[in-house]
Image (tube, helix red, strand yellow):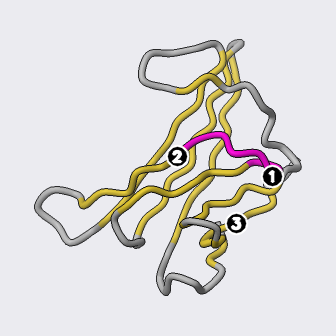
Amino acid sequence: MVSTGVIPGADGKVRLRSGSGKNRFNVEIEDVPAGSYTLRVDGVVVATIDAQPVPGTTHIEGEVEFAQPSEPGKLPLTFDPRGKLIEVLQGDTVVLQQLFPN
């Protein structure tokens, strides 16, 4: 993901994996202040990412995972991120964003 510069050093990754009738989508954020971040896909709020310190380090990270069909510990993947703008927000401010490839 691309940082908007609001939080210096903020970084993120977006990944979609498909195969064997399963789809998994995950978003990871790191090097952000601890707290809750909103995940938007194509302007629609789809989840909250809680960024927390990694035990034994000064590193802070958060992740949210989606799956279709449903899997324990993952949110239902009810949207297709391909070709959509993925945004991570702190309050109303976009911190990270990426136009996900088709």
Circle nearer the N terminus (3, 1): 1
Crowding at dot 3, Cα within 10 Å, few <14 / some 14-19 / many 20+, comes out as: many
Is 69 situated above or below 52? above
- Mark 2 vs 3, N-terminal side: 2
Q: Which mark is residue 97?
A: 3
Q: Is residue 30 left or right of residue 41?
A: left
Quarter assignment of residue 34: bottom left
Taking the image as shown, residue 72 lies to the left or right of residue 27, namely left
Apparent side of residue 21 relative to residue 34 in the rendered image (left or right) = right
- Badge 1 density bin: few <14, some 14–19, many ≥20, Cα 10 Å: few
- Please tell me how crowded label 2 is: few (under 14), some (14-19), or many (20+) other residues with Cα within 10 Å: some
Mark nearer the viewer, 2 or 3: 2
Look at label 1 and name its amino acid. Gly
When asked about the image quadrant of residue 85, the answer is bottom right
Identity of the amino acid at label 3?
Gln
> What x and y, as percent, mark residue 64?
50, 41
Helix, strand, or loop for circle 2? strand
Residues at discs 2 and 3 in contact (Cβ within 8 Å): no
Which residue in the structure is indicated by mark 2? 48
Q: Which residues are magenta?
A: 41-47
As rendered, which of 36 and 21 lies closer to the eye?
36
What percent of the width, then of the height, locates residue 84?
84, 50
The residue beneath circle 1 is 43
Q: Residue at x 58, y 14 (%)?
A: 70
Residue 23 position (above or below residue 53):
above
78 and 82: which one is in front?
A: 78
Q: Mark 2: which amino acid?
A: Thr
Looking at the figure, which quarter contains the N terminus? bottom right
Report if the CB atoms under discs 1 and 2 are less than 8 Å apart: no
Q: Is residue 31 above or below residue 7?
A: above
Please name the residue shown 73% across and 55% down the image: 86
